[in-house]
Structures are given as C-alpha cells and as structure tokens.
Image (cartoon, rainbow, N blue to C red):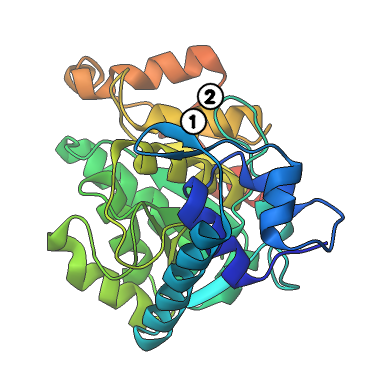
C-alpha cells in the first residue's frame, strides 16, 4: 500500500508534518478510503487542543488545502518527492532521529538538482557565531571534501553553515541546503542570494515543509536528522555544549556514521564557550580533526 502526494499532504494538514500518527496509515496494507484508515488506527484528532471525532468534512477541507499546496508549489517551481517514488534515496528511508526512532520523511519539497541526493554527501555544521578560526576551518573542510567529490550538506544558517556552502560553490562543487520552513521563504533573509546561487549552480534546496510554512524551534531540530541521514559523515566545526549541532550529532552517532569535530590549536579558541561542545562531542564518540590528519585518506574511506 502507498499514499499519493495529495493523501500525504492531507494527512500532514490534519495531524502535522512528520507526525507519528501518519506512519501507520502510510504503511498499512489496506485499500480503504482515507477516513476509514484513520478510524481503523484509532488516531486521535484534535481541534484547538480538544479531542474530537474526525469527519468527512475534515477530510474534504484538508484535501482542499492539499490541492492549494500542490498548485502553489508547481507555480513556484517547487518539486515534490514522495517516500513511495522510485527515485527516493534508500539512505533517507533509514532516517532516525536523535532518540533512535525511525522517522523517514514521507514527503520532501525541493528546488534544484534532485540527483544530488544520491551522491556521497558530507554534512558540515557549526555555530551561527563562529570565531575567525571556525569560519576558516569550515571553509577549508568544505573545500577539501568538495574536491574529493562529496556534496556538502548544511542548513544555510549564518556562520559555519554559510561558510561551508560558499566554499563548496567556490570550488565548483555541489551543495545541499536543508531548510526548516517552506521553500518560498529564506531564513536568514541575508542568505537569500546564497540560496539562489546554490540552485543556479546545480545545488539543491530541500525541506519537509510545504510552501507558506514558517519555521519553529521544533522544525530546526527536526530537520537536523535529515542532515545526518543524507550524509556519509558529519563534521561539527565549532559548537557550544547546548548548541543546535547536538541534535545532528546525536542522530549521526545513533546511525553509526562517523562524527568529527575540529581541534583548534589555539588555546584561546579552544576555551571559548562556542567551542566547548567540541570536547563534549569527543567524549560522546566523535573524533577530533587536527592539522596533522591526512584528509584525502581519511575521508575517501567514507565516499562509498
């Protein structure tokens, strides 16, 4: 059994993007109408926080919303990739979150070259307010990985993410930006030109969230698992102990993929609050990258 794109968006409208309630319906071997499948799974339905019985009218209104989203996406040149499509990458089917739960995205919205999802990928992330050394490290590592044929994955945030995307593009490499909102907006706005450059130079913008959807704290956390699942390895350049990079780091470690973080030679840089998370990650299972590492040999092991 599979769901159509319209059915997935309808369910997302009813229960929320990425809701755990959608998965039982999506993979249930049943040809019954959508309303009946929802009722068979005893899925709780709430309006304004109050539980109520789902009706055919609820389904109809959600379907109308789905139609508008599909139409608006097409008009904005936003593509849609379903879990049930033949070109959906296997590595995304194995997506887990930072708690180890299987959470493959049922539907992805994209702009750009979708074939990049099948390339060897490396995630490079870090604080939005890095030190000068952090920016240099992010740029250098992105450059080296792009030269070896990796597609650079990051989140289009300020700081380390921006440096990684730009360095890949400067190397004529490929890069994927995973966003935590609809693709009709860019956050931060200052990276709007960078997002356009990524697409025009053969890169990819990717999101679980439909057009006209704003970001939230949860959506930024949720998208981090996709950075982990898409990539062969992950590098956290510079982060505080409570930085957002901890979410993608946890998902990477639980996926049994290599996690790296940068060891800064300068003691003052190592003692910054924005670097304190690097040592913490090593204690959790990450490996330090130092200036003595042969990056060609190190990363080529994970290309295939």
Question: Residue 32 versus residue 177: which sits nearer the camera?
Answer: 32
Residue linked to disc 1: 249
Gap between marks 2 and 1 measured at Cα: 8 Å
Q: Residues within 10 Å of mark 2 (few under 14, many from 20)?
A: many
- Is residue 2 visible in this depiction of the protein? yes
Q: Are marks 2 and 1 in contact (CB under 8 Å)?
A: yes
Tell me where residue 70 appears, x and y as whole percent: 46, 77
Which residue appears at 21% of the width and 37% of the height? 133
For residue 271, above or below residue 127: above
Which residue appears at 49% of the width and 30% of the height? 249
Question: Residue 64 versus residue 273: which sits nearer the camera?
Answer: 64
Q: Is residue 23 left or right of residue 154?
A: right
**Which part of the image, by quadrant, shows the C terminus?**
bottom right
For residue 13, above or below residue 275: below
Single out the residue that lies furthest toward the right: 29
**Which part of the image, by quadrant, shows the N terminus?**
bottom right
Residue linked to disc 2: 286
Q: Nearer the viewer, mark 2 or mark 1?
A: 1
- Residue 72: quarter of image: bottom left
Disc 1, SS: helix
Tell me where residue 252 appears, x and y as whole percent: 57, 34
Tell me where residue 142 appears, x and y as whole percent: 40, 54
Single out the residue that lies furthest toward the bottom: 75
Disc 2, SS: loop
């Amino acid at each position: 059994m599979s769901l159509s794109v319209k059915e997935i968006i309808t369910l997302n409208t009813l229960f929320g993007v990425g809701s755990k309630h959608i998965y039982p319906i999506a993979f249930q071997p049943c040809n019954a109408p959508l309303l009946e499948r929802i009722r068979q799974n005893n899925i709780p339905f709430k309006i304004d926080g109050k539980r109520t019985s789902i009706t055919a009218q609820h389904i109809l209104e959600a379907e109308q919303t789905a139609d508008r989203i599909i139409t608006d996406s097409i008009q904005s040149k936003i593509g849609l990739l379903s879990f049930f499509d033949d070109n959906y990458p296997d590595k995304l089917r194995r997506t887990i979150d930072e708690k180890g739960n299987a959470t493959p995205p049922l539907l992805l919205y994209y702009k750009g070259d979708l074939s990049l999802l099948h390339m060897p990928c490396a995630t490079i992330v870090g604080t939005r307010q890095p030190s000068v050394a952090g920016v240099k490290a992010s740029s250098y590592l992105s450059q080296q990985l792009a030269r070896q044929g990796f597609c650079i994955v990051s989140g289009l945030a300020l700081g380390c993410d921006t440096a990684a995307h730009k360095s890949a593009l400067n190397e004529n490499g490929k890069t994927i930006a995973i966003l935590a909102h609809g693709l009709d907006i860019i956050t931060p706005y200052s990276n709007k030109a960078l997002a356009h450059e990524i697409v025009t130079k053969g890169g990819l913008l990717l999101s679980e969230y439909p057009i006209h959807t704003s970001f939230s704290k949860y959506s930024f956390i949720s998208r981090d698992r996709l950075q982990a699942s898409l990539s062969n390895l992950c590098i956290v350049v510079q982060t505080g102990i409570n930085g957002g990079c901890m979410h993608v780091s946890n998902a990477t470690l639980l996926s049994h993929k290599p996690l790296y973080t940068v060891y800064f030679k300068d003691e003052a840089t190592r003692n910054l609050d924005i670097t304190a998370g690097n040592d913490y990650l090593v204690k959790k299972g990450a490996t330090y990258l130092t200036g003595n590492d042969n990056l060609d040999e190190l990363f080529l092991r994970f290309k295939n």
